[in-house]
Image (cartoon, grey):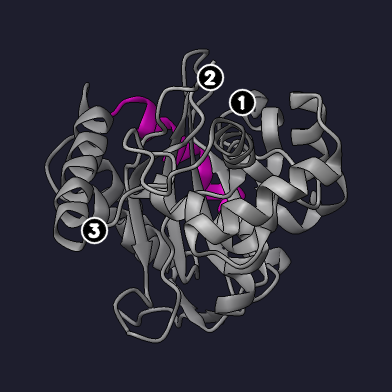
Amino acid sequence: MKKSPATEVNGFSLADPAGLIEAVAGWSEALHGNTSLEDAFACLARGLGAEAGVIVRTCPGRPFPQIVALHDEKAGDGHSRALRGSFAANLFGGYLQSARPATLWLASQHADESDAAADIGLHVWQSSRRMREMAVLTLNADPSFHDHIELHFRSRLNDQTVQLMNTILPSVARIWARRQVGLVTAQVAEKKRKAEVRASLDGAAPILGIENPAGLSRAEFRVTMLLSRGLSVKGVASELGLSEATVRSHLRNIYAKTGTGSLAQLVFRLLDRAADGGKPARRWA
C-alpha cells in the first residue's frame, strides 16, 4: 500500500492522516497511564508542525501556571533559548479561563486585544527563536482549573494547518477529559521534584522564592509580584497607588539586585523560574 506523502509546514513535516491518527492513539495511551505523556505530546506537536509546545494547567487564584508536559525540538542544542514555560495566561488574561473546550486561539489574531506589556515575555522568546505564531488549544473548562496546549511555529499558520487542528482538537480534548484520575497531579509533582533537584545542583533560586534571594525590599517585592502576574508598569502603579515614576525607580533597583537589564529580561526570568516549578513567597502585607 502506497503511503500518502507528508506536507511541509513551517519547516517541519506535517504528518499524513494515518500518522496523525497514530499520534492521537499514542495520546490516548499516555492519558490512560500506559506510555509517557511527554513522548506522546512530542509526537502530537511534531505531527502538527510545531517546533515547541507545552501542556499547561492554570488555576484561579494561583499566580503561576503549572507545566504538565513540555516539548522543544531545540532544547539542549546549546544555541537556542529553550522553551521553559507558558505565555497564554499573560497574553489572554481572564479570557483564557472562559475559553470553551476544543477551541483554537492564535496569538497573532488577538494581538490588538492584549496589553502590549502583558505579552513581552512571549515577544522576547519568539524573537530569540524566530517564531511567528503561538496556537492555544483549549482542553477543558472546569471551574477550578483550565487545561490547554500551547504550540509554537516559525511561520503563520496556513488554512490547511488551522483546519487540521480544528478537525483533531475535539478528539484530543475528549481523550483528555477521560484521562486517568490523578495523572496530571502526578505529572506536575514529578516535574516539580526534578526542578528542585536541578535548583539544588546549580544554586539558582526563584526571584520570588520564600528565601527572597535577591534581597528585595517590601515595595520591590510587591512590584515584582505584580509584574509576574502579567500587569504592566501602569497597572502596577494603579494597583499600588504609586506614580509610574516611582514604579520605574523601584524597577531600577530590582534590575540591579536580580542581575537583569530590562523589563523584558526580568519578566522572562520570572516566567522561566515559574515554569521550573518555582513558587512565589507569601505576599507581604
* Residue hosting label 1: 97
Element carrying mark 3:
helix
Q: Where is 267 relative to 217, above or below?
A: below
How far from the left and from the top, in percent, is residue 191?
A: 23, 45
**Residue at the image position 36 percent from the left and 46 percent from the top:** 213
Res 31 quadrant in image: top left
Which stretch did the figure color magenta? 165-180
How far from the left and from the top, in percent, is residue 159?
A: 72, 64
Q: Which dot marks residue 60?
A: 2
Label located before the other in sequence (2 or 1): 2
Magenta region's main secondary structure?
Answer: helix
Label located before the other in sequence (3 or 1): 3
For mark 3, does the 10 Å Cα neighbourhood hold few (<14), some (14 to 19), or many (20 or more) residues? some
Left or right: where 86 falls relative to 273: right
**Residue at the image position 19 percent from the left and 32 percent from the top:** 186
Q: Where is 158 relative to 268, above or below?
A: below
Residue 41 at least partly seen? yes
Q: Where is 196 relative to 159, above or below?
A: above
Q: Nearer the viewer, residue 131 or 205?
A: 205
Q: What residue type is disc 2 on? A: Pro
Quadrant that contains the N terminus: bottom left
Q: Nearer the viewer, residue 256 or 116?
A: 256
Labels 2 & 1 near each other (Cβ < 8 A): yes
Q: What residue type is disc 3 on? A: Asp
**Residue at the image position 64 percent from the left and 32 percent from the top:** 96
Inter-mark Cα distance, 2 to 1: 8 Å
Labels 3 & 2 near each other (Cβ < 8 A): no
Left or right: where 24 falls relative to 251: left
Res 261 quadrant in image: bottom right
* Residue hosting label 3: 39
